[in-house]
Amino acid sequence: MIRKLLPLLLFLCAAAFAASGRVYELRTYTAPEGKLDALIARFRDHTVSIFKKHGIESVGYWVPQDGERSKNTLIYIVAHPSREAATKNWAEFAADPEWKKVAAESEANGKIVSKVESVFMNPTDFSQLK
């Protein structure tokens, strides 16, 4: 009986860990033509520090080297203690008065983000990031 239940218990433990464990979020921002520099400046000068204030841990920021996406794309990865924490962190970030002011000021001459893509990820057992 125990041998039959052991795989189920292991699966449930793994599922519980995955549901509540550290998660990474891959985000890809597409900027309108000519606005990538403004988007990068906003991240460098404001967004990253506001992320930190709300528990959004920056892992890294990149721009593609080649092709059309090199002209309009910012890709970054952030980490959260859990998926639930991510939801809370983003809600607090969006409501932050400093963020609202920065967003409004940086878009005074038009939107600097035309598309946002987000993918939540769990590290593999062989990943150097856990």
Image: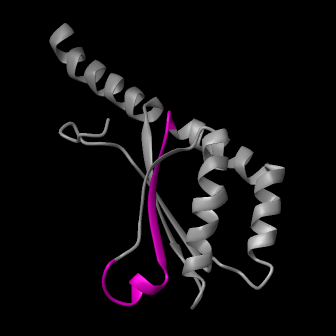
Residue 106, percent from left and from top: 74, 72
Q: Nearer the viewer, residue 73 or 81?
A: 73
Q: At x 35% / y 43%, what residue is drawn?
A: 122
- The relative height of residue 110 versus residue 42 in the rendered view (above or below) is below
Residue 107, quarter of the rendered image? bottom right
Q: Tell me, yes or no, if residue 1 can be seen here.
A: no
- The relative height of residue 16 versus residue 123 in the rendered view (above or below) is above
Residue 75, quarter of the rendered image? bottom left
Magenta stretch holds residue 76? yes
User: Which segment is the magenta one?
Assistant: 65-82
- The relative height of residue 53 versus residue 11 in the rendered view (above or below) is below
Residue 58, percent from left and from top: 49, 48
Q: Tell me, yes or no, if residue 2 can be seen here.
A: yes
Q: Quick check: 86 left or right of 22?
A: right
Which quadrant is home to the C terminus? top left
Residue 89, percent from left and from top: 64, 42
Q: At x 38% / y 34%, what residue is drawn?
A: 18
Q: At x 33% / y 89%, what residue is drawn?
A: 67
